[in-house]
């Protein structure tokens, strides 16, 4: 019963998933806030312009202010690629050395 409560209380996420989810939700939130503001300010027929401007604003703000989250996502991607490489046994240096010795 105790282990069931622990599982329900704290779901298991593979390494890096949490940082991806947080980064994505923050970026979507920035876009939604910018879109809502621009949709309210611009005339009704220009919703597409509000969407384009909101996307550019969200991109700019996330690039400037979300460097820490983006760094965590990048580190998680690098670690996942390294684990995948280690699991397959692919070593680019060893392959290059093998080619030179032949």
Image (tube, helix red, strand yellow):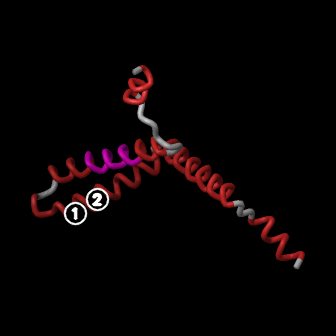
Q: CA distance from mark 2 to mark 1?
A: 6 Å
Q: Nearer the viewer, residue 100 or 70?
A: 100
Q: Which residues are magenta?
A: 24-33
Number of residues whose C-alpha sits closer than 10 Å to that of mark 1, classed few (under 14), some (14–19) or many (20 or more): some
Q: Residue at x 45, y 47 (%)?
A: 20
* Residue 53: mark: 2
Q: Are discs 2 and 1 less than 8 Å apart at CB?
A: yes
Task: Label 1, secondary structure: give it.
Answer: helix
Say left or right for 20 vs 82.
Answer: left
The image quadrant of residue 82 is bottom right
Examine the residues drawn in magenta and state their main secondary structure: helix
Q: Residue at x 15, y 63 (%)?
A: 46
Tell me, yes or no, whether the highlighted magenta stretch contains residue 81. Answer: no
Q: Residue furthest left?
A: 44
Say left or right for 32 vs 96.
Answer: left
- The picture places residue 2, in percent across and down from the top left corner, at 42, 20
Q: Residue furthest bottom?
A: 102
Residue that carries the numbered disc 1 in the rendered image: 49
Number of residues whose C-alpha sits closer than 10 Å to that of mark 2, classed few (under 14), some (14–19) or many (20 or more): some
- The picture places residue 27, in percent across and down from the top left corner, at 37, 48
């Amino acid at each position: 019963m105790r282990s069931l409560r622990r599982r329900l209380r704290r779901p298991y996420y593979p390494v890096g998933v949490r940082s991806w989810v947080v980064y994505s939700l923050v970026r979507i939130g920035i876009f939604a806030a910018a879109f809502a503001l621009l949709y309210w300010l611009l005339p009704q027929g220009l919703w597409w312009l509000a969407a384009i401007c909101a996307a550019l604003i969200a991109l700019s703000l996330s690039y400037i202010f979300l460097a820490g989250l983006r760094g965590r996502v990048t580190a998680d991607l690098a670690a996942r690629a390294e684990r995948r490489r280690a699991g397959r046994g692919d070593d680019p240096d060893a392959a290059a050395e093998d080619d030179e010795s032949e």
